[in-house]
């Protein structure tokens, strides 16, 4: 299981992957406008949460992440798997929602 320092790095990587050409193309070709809209909203939410985390004191963030380490690791792995299966746009959206939900919980701890 990764350390909390590695979790923050993996979170950054997953958010960057959401902006990759393969993911962008998958959602540009998606015919369901609701899915497109939800993807864009969820992707932006993840990016904003990560940005806010990075503005906070790193030691404080790492302490908070320790409490959710198992959940974060699972969400990061799930999002990575969903990104690899680029054709499953619903899976990507659901994974982003789970991922951003856990990140949002970091702001309520302490």
Image: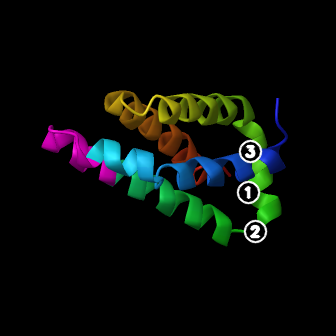
Toward the viewer: 106 or 73?
73
- Residue 70 higher or lower than 107, as above or below: above
Q: Residue at x 79, y 52 (%)?
A: 62
Sooner in the amino-acid sequence: mark 3 or mark 2 = 3
Look at discs 3 and 2 and give the one toward the viewer.
3
On screen, residue 65 versus residue 31, left or right, reads right
In primary-sequence order, the first of circles 3 and 1 is 3
Mark 2 and mark 1 residues within 8 Å of each other at the beta carbon:
yes
At horizontal 49% and vertical 59% (from top left) the residue drawn is 47
Q: Nearer the viewer, residue 20 or 63?
A: 20
Determine which quarter of the picture holds residue 65: top right
Asked whether residue 23 is drawn in magenta, I would say no
Magenta region:
28-40
Q: Are marks 3 and 2 in contact (CB under 8 Å)?
A: no
Q: Residue 50 at what x, y percent from top left?
A: 58, 59
Of the two numbered discs 3 and 1 in the rendering, the one whose residue sits closer to the viewer: 3
Residue nearer the viewer, 107 or 8? 8
Q: CA distance from mark 3 to mark 2?
A: 16 Å
Q: Quadrant of residue 16?
A: bottom right
Q: Position of residue 60 (x, y in %)?
A: 77, 59
Q: Alpha-carbon distance for marks 3 and 1?
A: 11 Å
- Residue 98 location, x and y as percent? 48, 35
Q: Secondary structure at mark 1?
A: helix
Q: Which mark is residue 97?
A: none
Q: Which residue is mark 1?
A: 61
Q: Which mark is residue 57?
A: 2
Q: Looking at the figure, which quarter contains the N terminus?
A: top right
Q: Which residue is mark 3?
A: 7
Residue at image location 65% in from the left, 36% down from the top: 72
Count of numbered circles in the view: 3
* SS at badge 3: helix
């Amino acid at each position: 299981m990764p350390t909390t320092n590695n979790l923050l790095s993996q979170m950054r990587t997953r958010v960057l992957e959401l902006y990759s050409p393969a993911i962008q193309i998958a959602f540009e070709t998606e015919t369901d406008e609701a899915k497109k809209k939800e993807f864009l909203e969820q992707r932006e939410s993840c990016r904003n949460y990560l940005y806010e985390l990075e503005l906070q004191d790193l030691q404080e963030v790492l302490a908070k992440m320790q409490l959710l380490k198992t959940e974060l690791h699972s969400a990061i792995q799930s999002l990575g798997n969903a990104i690899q299966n680029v054709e499953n746009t619903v899976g990507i959206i659901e994974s982003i929602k789970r991922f951003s939900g856990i990140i949002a919980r970091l702001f309520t701890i302490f």
